[in-house]
Image: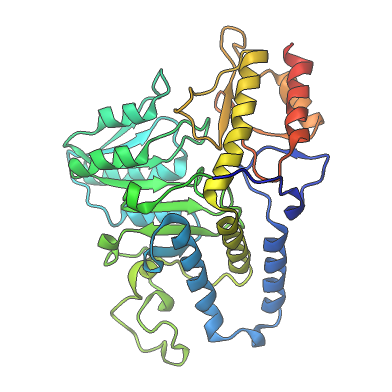
């Protein structure tokens, strides 16, 4: 692994904007924006769009994504959102009365609501694992796994503060208990290495618009081969056999397209979004996720250390936080109301863009950030917290 020099010139981020908020929405790469504009231009000339354009670009994306996570092209589905992917998982995993579905306290709702509904429909119990006092989410999840657990629906790291879950360790215990694993990797994939062989999820879904740097509305779903005969959420001609034979689409087919393609959403071709996603995935692979992670980890570690030393702010302990992600907590004894309103105002006035999530001030940089962005953040801390 090696660190990557600042890549700000690849993004349209003005120098006076200090955008430390990739966990919210990532800026598009200039190359992705150009690809999207080219795609939009093609849509204005639909006579130039052939049947091949509905399929080949998506197969290219499946290939790129499969390289990123160590899967195969047949394992990848194109979906519009995390909630769509999670609903697909819920439709294909058996849950019975008396069993338990595990999620985390304050987990992102796209990976919670469907499990509450499924528990109510089946007579299962939805168990929320409480935030551990010591910040060790892995230990807390492992302690909750027993022979009653049907599945655990988890992130790789918590969206509020970056609290880390050791997914390979959790997955091993779940498999030993005969339970399934569903992963929402939206706050990690693209910035933190993840290999399917190590995690072995039943389903994994990621939003494209965060650490994957893709356009909003484009997401990706991994389905393990054991679920390739599963039930899709919807039926459209292109997730069926011979869905590329336009002249014969009216000849209804009983079978589905190969592998996870049966889980593809309708109107998946995305003539504008798909080219941008492809350009982004190519760039991520060129940079190398290991190298991205090394670079961002150095940045967030410096932020965490300075925030603790100079201002007494807290973060999850070393080894319990995802390296690319840091949530700064304001100790209640000194800050009973959380981050001061004056600090939030100072950040806005200085064009320092971060997120307040729960009690954490979330600082999530990427390769477009530079020393000036970090200095601007701490200038605001100096002005208000000293």
Quadrant position of residue 124: top left
Count of numbered labels shown in the rendering: 0
Q: Residue furthest bottom?
A: 247
**Residue depicted at x 33% and y 27%:** 140
Is residue 253 left or right of 207 when viewed as pictured?
Answer: left
**Residue depicted at x 70% and y 62%:** 31
Q: Residue 81: where, in percent of width, then height? A: 50, 55
**Residue depicted at x 71% and y 41%:** 369
Quarter of the picture containing the C terminus is top right
Q: Residue 359: where, in percent of width, then height? A: 56, 23
Q: Residue 215: where, in percent of width, then height? A: 62, 58
Q: Nearer the viewer, residue 5 or 319?
A: 5
Q: Nearer the viewer, residue 203 or 234?
A: 203
From the viewer's perspective, is residue 121 above or below residue 269?
Answer: above
Quadrant position of residue 119: top left
Quarter of the picture containing the N terminus is top right
């Amino acid at each position: 692994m090696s660190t990557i020099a600042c890549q700000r010139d690849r993004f349209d981020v003005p120098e006076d904007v200090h955008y430390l908020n990739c966990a919210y929405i990532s800026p598009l790469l200039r190359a992705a924006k150009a690809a999207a504009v080219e795609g939009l231009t093609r849509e204005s000339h639909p006579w130039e769009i052939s049947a091949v354009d509905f399929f080949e670009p998506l197969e290219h994306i499946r290939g790129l994504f499969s390289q990123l996570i160590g899967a195969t092209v047949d394992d990848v589905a194109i979906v519009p959102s995390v909630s769509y992917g999670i609903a697909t998982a819920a439709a294909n995993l058996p849950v019975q009365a008396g069993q338990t579905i595990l999620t985390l306290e304050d987990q992102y709702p796209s990976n919670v609501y469907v499990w509450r509904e499924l528990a109510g429909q089946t007579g299962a119990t939805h168990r929320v694992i409480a935030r551990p006092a010591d910040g060790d989410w892995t230990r807390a999840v492992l302690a909750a796994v027993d022979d009653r657990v049907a599945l655990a629906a988890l992130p790789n790291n918590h969206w509020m503060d970056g609290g880390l879950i050791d997914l390979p360790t959790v997955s091993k215990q779940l498999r030993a208990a005969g339970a399934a694993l569903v992963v929402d990797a939206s706050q990690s994939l693209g910035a933190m290495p993840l290999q399917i062989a190590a995690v072995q999820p039943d389903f994994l879904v990621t939003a494209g618009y965060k650490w994957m740097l893709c356009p909003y509305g484009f997401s990706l779903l991994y389905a393990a081969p054991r679920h390739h005969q599963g039930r899709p959420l919807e039926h459209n001609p292109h997730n069926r056999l011979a869905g590329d034979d336009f002249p014969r689409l009216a000849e209804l087919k009983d079978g589905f397209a190969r592998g996870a393609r049966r889980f593809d959403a309708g109107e998946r071709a995305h003539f504008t979004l798909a080219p941008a996603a492809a350009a982004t995935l190519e760039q991520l692979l060129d940079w190398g996720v290991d190298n991205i992670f090394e670079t961002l980890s150095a940045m967030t570690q410096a932020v965490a250390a300075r925030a603790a030393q100079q201002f007494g702010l807290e973060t999850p302990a070393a080894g319990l936080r995802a390296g690319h992600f840091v949530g700064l907590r304001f100790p209640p004894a000194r800050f009973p109301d959380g981050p001061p309103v004056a600090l939030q105002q100072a950040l806005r006035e200085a064009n320092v863009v971060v997120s307040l999530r729960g009690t954490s001030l979330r600082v999530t940089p990427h390769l477009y950030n530079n020393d000036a962005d970090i200095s601007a953040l701490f200038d605001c801390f100096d002005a208000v917290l000293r």
